[in-house]
Amino acid sequence: MDDPVIGIDLGTTNSAVGIVEAGFPILLANEEGERLVPSVVWFGPEGAVKVGRAALREPEANRTVRSAKRLMGQRFAERDQGVLRTLAAQDGGIALALPDRVVTPPEVGAEILKELKRIAEYRLEGPVRRAVITVPAYFNNAQRAATKLAGEIAGLEVLRLVAEPTAAALSYGMDKLDERSRVVVFDLGGGTFDVSLLELREGVFEVLATGGDTMLGGDDFDAALVAEVCARLEKNSCETGESERFRREAERVKCELSESEQSTFRVPFYDGTSSLEEGFSRAELEVLLEPQLTGMKRICGAVLVDAKVEPRDIEAVVLVGGSTRMPVVKGFAREVFGREPDCSQHPDEAIALGASIQAGILAGTWRKVLLLDVTPLSLGIETLGGLMNVLIPRNTTIPCKAGELFTNARDGQDRMRVRVLQGERELARDNWELGQFDLPFQPRVRGKARVGVQFSLDENGILEVLVRDVEGERDLVVEIESAAVDVSDAAVEQMVSESVDHAFEDMNARIFTEARLKAGELLPAVQEALREFGEDMEEGERDEIEAARGAVVEALEGNSASALKGAVEQLDEATEALAARVVEQALSGQLEDDKLNN
Ligand code: AMP
């Protein structure tokens, strides 16, 4: 095959690679016939590296890196506490301290990608240079950039980063659905839960909404089972050394209960003398998982609301991820979305197959379907009064562009500070800063400068900000690729739920700030107009204006948004006639000037 494009699922626990061959997507197996490569890298002495099962066989925990995907694009400040010691990398990201070297998450990802590239080259019997890689739909700019960097370190040109749910839907052959069909992709793996609602329009998939929890998955089910066993033993928690045995046994019992109604939790000589045998029924396990299922239900509900879709408008529900093998999870998906889920694909392979189809589309070996993703969080800039001004709302289909014109707030201001923000909160300070920079321009009087800000999000979800001084024709283009996004994956979800929790006070703060800014304009203007025209006004009108002005000044002292807004509106209304007089005077002054000039 000439210059093939491979599709890669770079997963937290397992990774896989595939390609479209003779019009069909297939996964490529290594020499042992395995199509899933554990996402584990062992960094041995003198630069030796092993990936996948070979790495798992190595005993030294302090040389073995797992789940590097969780650290991709993370800041040092928000590192996870794992077996390995973490350090701050030069760029502020995380580095992992091994006995004789230091590695960054993209370098670890690159080792996995190199292995997948090697498998593909072995199967295809030729060099592979280009790839499509999947990323979770909620990955932010920094995480996407880190994934792309991993590809580059591995010697791959990353043609596109594709959202995992879109890849999953593709692998289920969802492109054969009718126009405007809606598909839910329900992905529950070991450590994460993702749910996305896609819509097919003119042969193109659009993600209408996504939601999830990066800290919820099969591992939590195992933990719930271990906690129950400990409770039955009347222990608060397991002793060190026991916990890994208990966890492994819990996972085995959980998986067995997907096939049978009963299982037994067995740990021989767990405390050196006695053996443990605890029977579990499937129903008992399901009761233990109720808190997790309740959390999942809330997330699914939010996705439906976000997408403005009713369950009856959904054509297909696709299940992905190992934990969807559990009958309770299948039943849950059926109940929440009102239809039988499609489990026709291997849940561990669907995403890699979809990535391969997308690779085939780009290589021209596959037909028609295109993919579109959405923004996981809103993007905007800070404006006057510390407010968030959203340019691209959350869940907008990408690639996309949006812009707005802004002006200067002060006389003689000669630069504009652009703070690029990501998040759902009304006040800038509650959102995350992706970057900030200054656009210098000719000093002008207040309100006279015109500065356009345009955001372009490319198909990889990487943001480019163009700032233009319209008159001065000065441009500044900043790519927010490796910007400091001071957040963890979980914080993305936290942001969304906090915006819901604080919706009321946030909205009040916005209304108060907007009314305060308006008052800041109105009060001096009214003062000036009263000075000039006050003498000629009827007493009643003047008193009314004075009273309204007093009410605004008083409301500014307080903290009630509705009181201030009401007072400002009242002042605006009371000064309508006065404002008309000011305009009239200005116009006649202008006419006089014109006459004199002619
Ligand atoms: P993934 O991250 O998609 O590879 O999924 C891994 C998770 O799926 C782990 O928590 C496994 O315990 C879980 N899993 C795999 N097979 C089963 C099964 N038959 N029943 C229940 N959970 C399973």
Image (cartoon, rainbow, N blue to C red):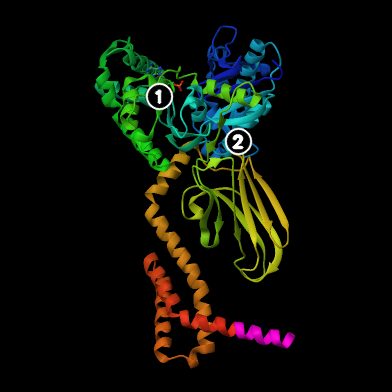
Q: Which residue is mark 1?
A: 219
In the rendered view, would you say 456 is above or below 404? above
Q: Earlier in the sequence, mark 2 or mark 1?
A: 1
Q: Residue furthest right?
A: 598
Q: Quarter-wise, where is residue 279 in the image?
A: top left
Q: Is residue 104 visible to us here? A: no
Q: Is residue 409 visible to us here? A: yes
Q: Which residue is mark 2?
A: 460
Q: Residue at x 46, y 79 (%)?
A: 576
Q: Quarter-wise, where is residue 281 in the image?
A: top left
Disc 1 marks which amino acid? Asp
Per the rendered image, the range of residues in magenta is 587-598
Q: For this view, does 123 lie left or right of residue 422? A: right
**589 magenta-colored:** yes
Q: Main secondary structure of the magenta part?
A: helix
Circles 2 and 1, Cβ within 8 Å, touching? The answer is no
Q: Within 8 Å of ligand 1, the CB of disc 2?
A: no
Quarter of the figure that contains the N terminus: top right
In the rendered view, would you say 582 is above or below 243? below
Q: For this view, does 411 lie left or right of residue 430? A: right
Q: Position of residue 288 (x, y in %)?
A: 28, 26
Q: Secondary structure at mark 2?
A: loop
In the rendered view, would you say 505 is above or below 77? below
Q: Position of residue 218 (x, y in %)?
A: 39, 24
Q: Position of residue 324 (x, y in %)?
A: 39, 22
Q: Position of residue 87 (x, y in %)?
A: 59, 34
Nearest to the observer: residue 239 or residue 186? 186
Disc 2 marks which amino acid? Asn
Q: Residue at x 52, y 78 (%)?
A: 524
Nearest to the observer: residue 186 or residue 67? 186
Q: Residue at x 49, y 93 (%)?
A: 535
Q: Within 8 Å of ligand 1, the CB of disc 1?
A: yes
